[in-house]
Amino acid sequence: DGEATPTLTVGDAGTVDEGNAATFGVTLDTPVQGDVSYTLTLGGDIDANDIDSVTLVDSQGNPITGATLTLNQDGTYTATVPGNVTAFSVVVDTVDDSVFEGDEGLTLTVATTLGGQNISDNGTATITD
């Protein structure tokens, strides 16, 4: 065996107008055997009312075959993705509300355990109002 634990990378989503989607690219540098369960945590200046939906898509923007996404009671999400999928995007659709909030920061933290090692990374976005 002796293979190194894969490296997890989450890209930044840049600046997004409120009401549009923040898209975070997620990559593993090597495929793994079996499904991978990721914990997705949204943070920053935003709150639950600022989020319309969260989805997983492949590099072409299509749903990932065999993937599931579940909202947990604590507000995190559990994403289960086939181990041969080494790149996907987490799309966070924001709500365009009538309240002026100024620029808000949004952070996506993605974490998993592979080969007994906890690995995580995060990406950021700025939501402009």
Image (cartoon, rainbow, N blue to C red):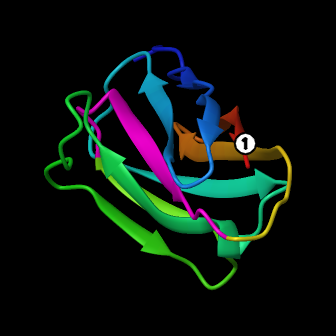
At 76% across and 68% down in the image, what residue appears?
Answer: 47
Relative vertical location of residue 119 with respect to residue 97 in this rendering, above or below: above
The kind of secondary structure element at disc 1 is strand
Q: Name the spot of residue 40 as percent of width and height, x first.
A: 59, 54
Q: Amino acid at mark 1?
A: Thr
Occupied quadrant, residue 110: top right
Residue 65 forms part of the magenta stretch: no
Occupied quadrant, residue 83: top left
Q: Residues within 10 Å of mark 1 (few under 14, many from 20)?
A: some
Q: Name the spot of residue 68 as percent of width and height, x first.
A: 30, 63
Relative vertical location of residue 90 with respect to residue 78 in this rendering, above or below: above
> 41 or 7, which lies in front?
41
User: What is the tally of numbered marks visible in this picture?
Assistant: 1
> 98 or 4, which lies in front?
98
Q: Which residue is mark 1?
A: 128
At 20% across and 50% down in the image, what residue appears?
Answer: 63
> 102 or 34, which lies in front?
102
Range drawn in magenta: 82-97
Q: Name the spot of residue 62 as percent of width and height, x first.
A: 18, 43
Q: Name the spot of residue 116 as percent of width and height, x first.
A: 59, 41
At 27% across and 45% down in the image, what residue appears?
Answer: 34
Residue 85 forms part of the magenta stretch: yes
Occupied quadrant, residue 122: top right
Quarter in which the N terminus is drawn: top left
At 57% across and 23% down in the image, what residue appears?
Answer: 9
